[in-house]
Amino acid sequence: MATRRAMRLGSQIKEELSLILFQEVRDPRIGLVTVIDVVLTPDLKRSKVYVSITGSPEDRKATLASLERAGKFIRHKLAERLAIRFTPEIVFYLDTSIDYGERIDRLLAEIKSKPESP
């Protein structure tokens, strides 16, 4: 169970990461990235950052790899923006829940379009 402090800090990290990725990361290999969620460990030393990336599966892999390479830079920028003693280590994960939801929508539409048998 996440503490209130971990949840508040996670929310703040999510906002700041979104701004850093949009304004300060200049890597052309990083495509359109949306920060979906940030989950902190109870000791606030590590953060799991779930991101949604648009594009083909190859583009997603390349963007995720570029995010991992830029992790130290992003962590440094995050440390400049947050007033905390220790900036958590950032680990990026691809969030596929949007793809899963789209697949369910397609399957439901497919079922709905089939004629019922008498």
Image (tube, rainbow, N blue to C red):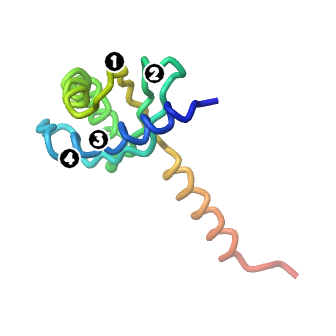
Residue 57 in the image: state x and y as whole percent: 37, 41
Residue 73 in the image: state x and y as whole percent: 18, 25
| Earlier sequence position, callout 1 versus callout 4 | 4
Q: Which residue is mark 1?
A: 86
Q: Hey, which quadrant is residue 62 in on the image?
A: top left
User: Answer yes or no: do the residues labelled 1 and 2 have beta carbons within 8 Å?
Assistant: yes
Question: Disc 3 residue type?
Answer: Glu
- Mark 4–mark 3 Cα distance, whole angstroms, equals 10 Å
**Kind of element beneath mark 2:** loop
Q: Which residue is mark 4?
A: 22
Crowd rating for badge 4 (residues with CA inside 10 Å; few <14, some 14–19, many 20+): few
Query: In this view of the protein, which residue sits in the foreground, 89 or 101?
Result: 89
Q: Residue at x 25, y 30 (%)?
A: 78
Crowd rating for badge 2 (residues with CA inside 10 Å; few <14, some 14–19, many 20+): some
Q: Quadrant of the C terminus?
A: bottom right
On residue 16, the disc is 3
Vertical placement of residue 85 versus 99, above or below:
above
